[in-house]
Image: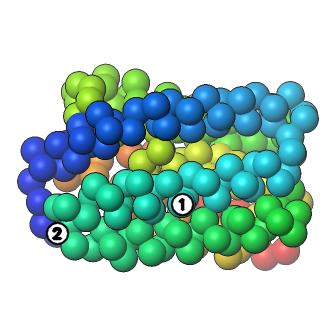
Amino acid sequence: MRPPFSAAQFFQVFAAYNTALWPAVLALWLASVATVLALVRGRPSDRWLAGLLAVLWAWGGVAYHAAFFSRINPAARLFAALFVIEALVFLRMAGAGTLRFGWGRSPRHLLAAALLVCALAYPGLAVASGHPYPATPTFGVPCPTTLFTGGLLLAARPRVPRWPVVVPVVWSAIGGSAALLLGVTPDLMLFPAGAALAVYAFRPA
């Protein structure tokens, strides 16, 4: 199914987003890099990690979907609502301290590392795929947020709760279509990310 907008309109939205919000986008990226380094070094703050996920999903819902993507896609308002709901789920888990993280060398953690690296390198990968800045998806928009979330949730222990996985898995299918329809090749990682999250969250205990 073709989207209700052209490829040119799609990338013009990113140009407007990056031009208007680049200082906040850079701050989110730096905070996320610092968070990943703390996790890998074995000094994660569980509440901080869950809180950062809440901020990223709220940002994607309000600053991207509602403020920019809704200009060309009426469904963006629904997407914004889903992202804000996901942010509230993470915010509640941050307050309750029910989402815990750890790092190791298992295959699950290797996949988590691949997703985190892909999420943090996403702006450069998008430019390398033929979409010059500023008309390129950068950090803080839905697809790298989903990859980043997948990486962190795969590092949850002893297993990730099911509720916060639903929206990222759904968006992995929706956003992954951009790789096929709009040529954003880094979004191909959304398919294995969504599959891995679904298996990890819904496997038998």
Query: Amino acid under label 1?
Result: Ala
Q: Residue at x 81, y 36 (%)?
A: 39
Quarter of the image containing the C terminus?
bottom right
Tell me which colouring the rendered structure shows. Answer: rainbow
Relative to 79, is 12 on the left or the right?
Answer: left
Q: Is 12 drawn above or below residue 169 in the view shown?
A: above
Dot 2 crowding, Cα within 10 Å, few <14, some 14–19, many 20+: few
Q: Position of residue 74 (x, y in %)?
A: 22, 73
Q: Nearer the viewer, residue 33 or 196?
A: 33
Q: Is 60 drawn above or below residue 28 in the view shown?
A: below
Q: Is 54 drawn above or below residue 145 in the view shown?
A: below
Q: Position of residue 158 (x, y in %)?
A: 89, 60
* Of pointers 1 and 2, the one earlier in the residue sequence: 2
Q: Residue at x 52, y 49 (%)?
A: 145
Q: Which mark is residue 154?
A: none
Q: Position of residue 44 (x, y in %)?
A: 86, 40
Cβ–Cβ under 8 Å for marks 1 and 2: no
Query: For the residue labelled by badge 1, is the local secondary structure a helix, a strand or a loop?
Result: helix
Q: Position of residue 105 (x, y in %)?
A: 83, 35
Task: Nearest to the eye among marks 1 and 2: give it.
Answer: 1
Residue at numbered disc 2: 1
Report, in whole angstroms, how far the alpha carbon at label 1 lies from the one at label 2: 28 Å
Residue at numbered disc 1: 58
- Res 128 visible: yes
Relative to 198, is 156 on the left or the right?
Answer: right
Q: Residue at x 49, y 37 (%)?
A: 24
Q: Residue at x 41, y 68 (%)?
A: 80
